Image (spheres, rainbow, N blue to C red):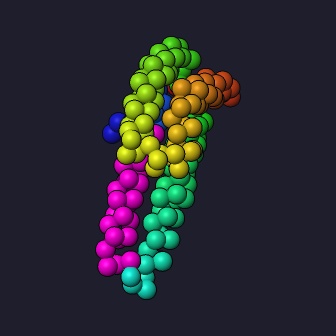
């Protein structure tokens, strides 16, 4: 039976970029939907019930705190996952050019995705809601530097490992 050795590949940075963009846009759209649902509750007979203050507080908590904290949690976990996988893999140093090329393509793509996010949140209906999401907006504005830092740190970790003696090929 052949034993497969699973290794991380240089597309981790691209996956980080795509997931961040998807999460940021999804959270803005879900926040907009929640604000519309809250408006419906405010204008119907539900605002006269005893549960109305609880409903309003729940929508405010979800739209302002939970979305922000959820995005930061996912963002941190994705970066930690990339760095941990960088520690756990063994790659021959000859593949550094593939990593550099992939990082460059991810940074190039990040510019377009950051601009797309800016276009989404500059929409008149979403602009007031997106103003509450300071961390998501900051992350998407600085996604190029974040990818550069994460990718560079990942490459330093991957390609600077010192392997011990022993007759076994570490690759």
- The reply to whether the magenta stretch includes residue 151 is no
The reply to whether residue 161 is visible in this rendering is: yes
Question: Is 119 or 94 nearer to us in this picture?
Answer: 119
Q: Classify residue 51 by image quadrant.
A: bottom left
Question: Is 63 or 78 nearer to us in this picture?
Answer: 63
Q: Classify residue 162 by image quadrant.
A: top right
Q: Classify residue 23 by image quadrant.
A: top left
**Residue visible at 53% across and 50% down in the picture:** 132
Question: Is 152 or 169 nearer to us in this picture?
Answer: 152
Q: Is residue 115 above or below residue 75?
A: above
* Picture mark count: 0
Query: Horizontal and vertical percent for residue 133?
Result: 52, 48
- The reply to whether the magenta stretch includes residue 38 is yes
Query: Horizontal and vertical percent for residue 17?
Result: 45, 33
**Residue visible at 38% across and 70% down in the picture:** 42
**Residue visible at 49% across and 55% down in the picture:** 67
**Residue visible at 52% across and 45% down in the picture:** 131
The reply to whether residue 106 is visible in this rendering is: no
For this orientation, the residue located farthest to the bottom is 50
Query: Horizontal and vertical percent for residue 8?
Result: 47, 33
Q: Is residue 25 above or below residue 46?
A: above
Stretch of the chain drawn in magenta: 18-47
Main SS of the magenta part reads helix
Query: Horizontal and vertical percent for residue 15?
Result: 42, 35
Q: In the picture, which quadrant includes the N terminus? A: top left
């Amino acid at each position: 039976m052949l034993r497969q050795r699973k290794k991380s590949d240089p597309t981790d940075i691209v996956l980080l970029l795509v997931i961040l963009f998807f999460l940021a846009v999804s959270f803005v759209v879900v926040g907009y939907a929640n604000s519309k649902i809250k408006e419906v509750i405010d204008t119907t007979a539900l605002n006269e019930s005893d549960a109305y203050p609880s409903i309003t507080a729940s929508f405010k908590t979800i739209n302002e705190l939970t979305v922000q904290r959820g995005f930061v949690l996912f963002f941190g976990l994705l970066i930690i996952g990339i760095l941990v996988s960088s520690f756990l893999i063994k790659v021959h140093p000859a593949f550094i050019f593939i990593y550099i090329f992939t990082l460059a393509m991810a940074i190039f793509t990040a510019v377009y995705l950051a601009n797309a996010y800016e276009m989404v949140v500059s929409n008149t209906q979403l602009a007031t809601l997106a103003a509450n999401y300071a961390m998501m907006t900051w992350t998407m504005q600085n996604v190029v530097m974040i990818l550069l830092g994460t990718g560079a740190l990942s490459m330093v970790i991957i390609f600077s490992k010192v392997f011990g003696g022993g007759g076994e090929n570490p690759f």
